[in-house]
Amino acid sequence: MKKRIKEGWLTDILWAFCIVTSFCSGVGIVVGAESENALLNFVSKIANSASVFNLIDGAAFLGMLFLIRFVRRRTPRIDPTGAVTGLLLGLLYLLSFAFRDAGGLTVLCANGYQCLLSAFLLFGYSSLIYLLFEAAAAVLSGIPVTPERPRSLPVFVLSAVLILVGWLFWILMSYPGSVAGDAIAQLSYYFSGDMSAHHPPLSTWIMGACVELGGLIADRRFGLFLYLLLQALICAGIMGCCVERMHGWGLPDRLCALTVLFLGFTPIIGLFAQWFEKDMLYSAVTLLFAVQTGDLLRRNTISRRTAAALLAVSLLCCLLRHNGIYSVVPLLFALLFVFHEKKEKVLAAVVLAATVLLYIGITGVLFPAMGIRKGNVREALSIPMQQSARYLRDHGDAVTEEEWDVLSSFFTDMEAVPAVYASDGSDPVKDLVTTEFDHPMAYFRTWFTMGCKHPETYIEAFGCLNYGYLAPAGQNTEPELLTRDVVREQLLMLGIDASQDETRSAILENIVRINTMFPLLRYLTMPGCYVWLVLLLCAVLIKEKRKRELIWFLPAVMTILVCLASPLSNAMRYELSLVLSAPLMIGWTISACCPAASGKRPSEGAG
């Protein structure tokens, strides 16, 4: 085997060269010499495909060669799981840039040369991802995991305090905190008494009550800060619990320390900590749900006490965000098949049934009885809305009279739809959708038949709306450090002065700029990185034949699916729960793949 590896130097050098060259090329239409000489035209296109990065390409080549040799020493043969993972993510990476930069797939196959270039890029991207995956799997499986450790109050307290201190810097510097546009609607619901379920009523009540309490103590401006402070205390406590559980699972102390550093002192999380919005609290509660279910899967048992706690947290997840029900129910259902004792199966079934029934009862019976208006159905139709709008833009002449009539019952202004269509967000089109359309089945039948005629249009509409989730193809520092003027004016109408110190906010903006520009650190602001993290960790578990531990990733997978159905192409707040859970997901995978000192894997034990 060593002889075969030694003789593969030439192949490895060529492989490394191809990978580096692929990343030095761009996804775009390459222009040649425009000559009748095919050879001249072809050669000139190759020259125009490349770009120069000074010494970076040389360093990248040496690093790539080292990575290839590292992987080949451990897996001389191509690993099927790694190969499939590399090909899938490489394809997503290629497609995401085509959707982002060219708005469609034409750029990948515009002519013969473009097809060759796309194939070459796919080979390079897939190869790099395969090598990184195999190297990461080797590293993760080699990290030592100690036996289960007892609960540690000092670890919990120290972690929570450090995380809180890191957030207080952002909260105090941006006092009273920046306010999101959606929060305006929630505060308007609360103070007008005209409640709507467009945003989760529970988070509306919490936010409104804090602002009202602040008005009683000082003023409503202080109320904004009071909410952020209360949120920081709760979320820091949950994250302290997360670090303590990682420590208890026997994960390395260094990983626990890095988790505290990531959660408490990463600028992108600090941004969310000072943002008056509903997503931070929901995401922290989903992290607590992940900790609870992780404990249950490791111990392979459930008691009445843990069942009651799980029910409470599951219900909170469902009530703090509309898509919370989709995150918790699949995992709760899967738990029915995890436990072996009849009593434990009954407890798991009770938690599942109680979560669903209470959620239906609260949202379907209690809220209407309290006069809370229902949310609009169009909020869940971003994908079909965009696909219909793009179809009207690209194939308006092909729309039949019958199709036009049906679409007219869906859109309020058919003529305006093509003009307002924006490929990376569905809000402009959403504003032209009727609040309640009379014949939904007729619309969906028409939507289906139109898609069968031009499926490429639907694929491009979906891809352009989701390029930021498909791959690390764009950055997003969504929370604003200064509340926008229009939002401040709306807040003044509610008796809230949201003015901030612009000098302090400028300091924070420069810290955020560092986060977005520094090598490696900038990837923390890319939503696609966290989607890929979930996919790669799941692939590692499959490679290590730890399929049972995949159950725990169900909420993360559901969150990704919700992001793909969301109205924005690159929104960090929709997948904030993945961001906060990132260290825990890595720790879970390490613990699942590495036998503990006792010789047992996490899932082994009772049953």
Image: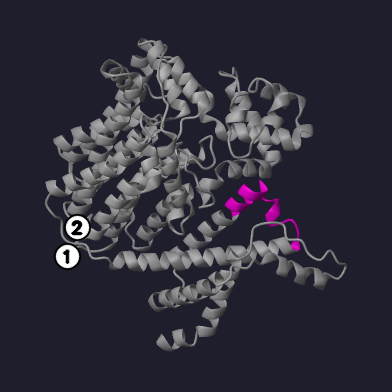
Looking at the image, is mark 1 or mark 2 nearer the viewer? Answer: 2
Let me know if residue 189 appears in the view: yes
Amino acid type, residue under disc 2 in the picture: Gly
Q: Quadrant of residue 136?
A: bottom left
Let me know if residue 532 appears in the view: no
Foreground of the two, 553 or 428: 428
The correct choice, above or below, for 123 with respect to 451 in the image is below
Amino acid type, residue under disc 1 in the picture: Ala
Read off the residue under disc 2.
Answer: 250
229 sits to left or right of 27? left
Is the image coloured rainbow, by chain, by secondary structure, or in one colour?
one colour
Query: What is the chief secondary structure element of the magenta stretch?
Result: helix
Which residue appears farthest toward the right when viewing the image?
Answer: 36
Point out residue 112 in the picture as x, y percentages from the top left corner.
75, 63
The residue sitting at 60% across, 31% down in the picture is 385
What is the number of the mark on residue 597?
1
First in sequence: mark 1 vs mark 2: 2
The magenta stretch spans which residues? 95-112
Question: Would residue 566 be counted in the magenta stretch?
Answer: no
366 sits to left or right of 246? right
235 sits to left or right of 54? left
